[in-house]
Image (tube, rainbow, N blue to C red):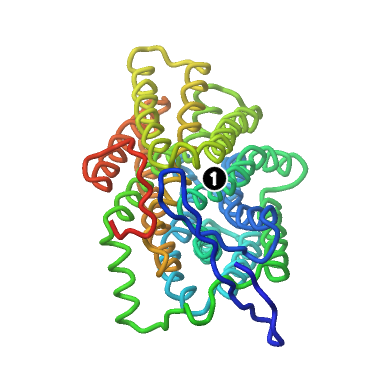
Amino acid sequence: MKHTSDSTGSFAEAPADRRATSDGYSETVRDPGIPFAEFVTIIAMIMALNAMAIDVMLPALPAIGDALEIVEENNRQLILLSYLIGFGGGQLFFGPITDAMGRRKVMTGGLALYSLASVAAVFAADLDQLLIARILQGVGCAAARVAALSVVRDCYTGRRMGKVMSLVMMVFMAVPVIAPSIGQAVLIFAGWPWIFTLLLLSGVAMLVWTAVRLPETLAPQNRRPMVLSKIIGAYKMALTTRVSLGYTVGTAFIFGGLFAFLAMSQQIFVDVFGLGTLFPVVFAAIAIAMAASSFTNAQLVEAIGMRRLSHGATVLYTGLGFLLLLMPLLGLENFWTFMILTSLVMMSFGFMGANFNAMAMEPLGAIAGTASSVIGTISTLGGAILGYIMGQLFDGTTLPLGLAFTVYGLCAIGCILYAERGRMFHALERAGSPE
C-alpha cells in the first residue's frame, strides 16, 4: 500500500496490486510504505514480545517461586497462565477499536501498557501483585498483536499472506531459541526482577520503532464506526464463517499442546531428566527446529499451498504425540527419544501456526481487526486453558505431554474436517470467500 504523508502526518492509500496464483485464484498485495524486510521485522518483533514474556521466564520459575513463597511447584505455572489470560482475553476487545481508530494508535497504546506493566512486575512484592502485572502485560501485548495482524491483512491476502506470516513466525521463533538462555544469564548475574527490566526495555524499543517508522495501513474511508450493532455483526461474522471458525478452534487445540509443553518444560528437563542449567540449551535446540520449519513453510507455501502443508503437519503432530504417549507407558522413556520426538512435534507446529492463522483471517478482510481479536482470543485463551489443564496433570513423567499432543491433535484434525466440509489436503485457496 503506497502512502504519502500529508500536513497532519496521516497517510493516503494507493491502489492494490491483484495477482493470480498458480491455481488461478487471486491475491492482493499492497506496499506497506516501508521496505518489506523492515515491515516483516517490525511485525515479527511485536509478536516476539509475547514469546519473550513467556520463554525468558522459564528458568526463573523456581527462583520466583522461592522468593514469593509458592509452595506447590505446579502453581508456578500461574505466572505463565496469568499472562496468557491477559493476552488471550484482551484481544477480544481491541478488534473493533483498531477497526474504528486505525492500527497505529492501538499498537502504540498496547506497547506502552506492556512497558508500564513490566515496571509493575519489577517491583511486585508478592504473588498477587506479580499476577496482576502479568495480566496487564498480556493485555498490552494483546493490543499490539491484534493491530499487527490487522496490518498484515491490510496489505496481503492469499498465499502471499501465508508467506508473510511464515516469515514473521520465523523471526518470532528466534526468540524462544535465545530467551531461556538470556533468562538464565540474568539469573547468574542478578535477581529475577531484572528479567522484567529486560521486558521493559524491549517494549520501549518496539514502541519507539513502531511510532517512528510504521505508517497507518487502514484508510479513513475503510474504518468501521464503533456502533454496537455493527460490532455485534462483526463478531457474529467472525464466529459463523465456517473456514474461520474451524481453523481458529483448530489453532486453539494446537496451541493447547504448545502451551502444555511450555508449562511442563522446565519440570520435565530439570526434574525428570536432571539437566539443571543445561535446560536453556535443549530448549533452544527444540526452538531451532520450530524456526527451521517456519522458514521451510515460507519457502514452500506459495508453491504447495497452505492447506496441504498444514493438514499434513497436523496428522504428523498427532502421530508423534501418540508415540510420546507410548514411551512412558512401555517403560521406554529416556532423554533422547523424548528430545527427538518433541523436536519433530515442534517442527510440525511450524507448518500449522502461520497457515491456520492466515486461513482463518482470509475470508474476513472487511473486519480484519475484529477478526484478528476473535481469532487471537479463542486460539490463545483456549490454548492457555487447555495447556494449563494438562500442565496440572504433571506427575513426574512425560506422559501428560504425550497425552496433550495426541488428544489435542485429534481435535485439530476434527476442526479441519469441519472447516473443509470433510476434505483434507486439497489445494484450493478461496480468497475472499465467506466459506
Q: Position of residue 422 (x, y in %)?
A: 21, 40
Residue closer to the observer: 223 or 48:
223
Q: As drawn, which residue projects farthest toward the left?
A: 422
Q: Is residue 371 left or right of residue 286?
A: left
Q: Is residue 195 left or right of residue 407?
A: right
Tell me which residue sits at (37%, 12%) in the image: 331
Q: In the rendered image, which residue does mark 1 sit on?
A: 166
User: How many residues crowd around disc 1 within 10 Å: few (fewer than 14), some, or many (20 or more)?
Assistant: many
Q: Position of residue 284 (x, y in %)?
A: 62, 33
Q: Is residue 322 visible?
A: yes
- In the structure shown, which secondary structural element does the residue marked by tag 1 occupy? helix
Tell me which residue sits at (63%, 69%) in the image: 2
Residue closer to the observer: 17 or 409:
17
Q: Is residue 137 visible?
A: no
Quadrant location, the N terminus: bottom right
Q: Position of residue 398 (x, y in %)?
A: 42, 26
- Residue 183 in which image quadrant: top right
The answer to whether 303 is drawn above or below residue 240 in the figure is: above
- Count of residue discs: 1
Q: Is residue 359 left or right of residue 213?
A: left
Tell me which residue sits at (34%, 46%) in the image: 250
Residue type indicated by callout 1: Ser
- Residue 209 in which image quadrant: bottom right
Q: Is residue 394 left or right of residue 179?
A: left
Q: As drawn, which residue projects farthest toward the bottom?
A: 7
The answer to whether 272 is drawn above or below residue 32 in the figure is: above
Quadrant location, the C terminus: bottom left
Residue closer to the observer: 352 or 330:
352
Q: Position of residue 388 (x, y in %)?
A: 39, 45
Q: As drawn, which residue projects farthest toward the right?
A: 189
Residue closer to the observer: 242 or 75:
242
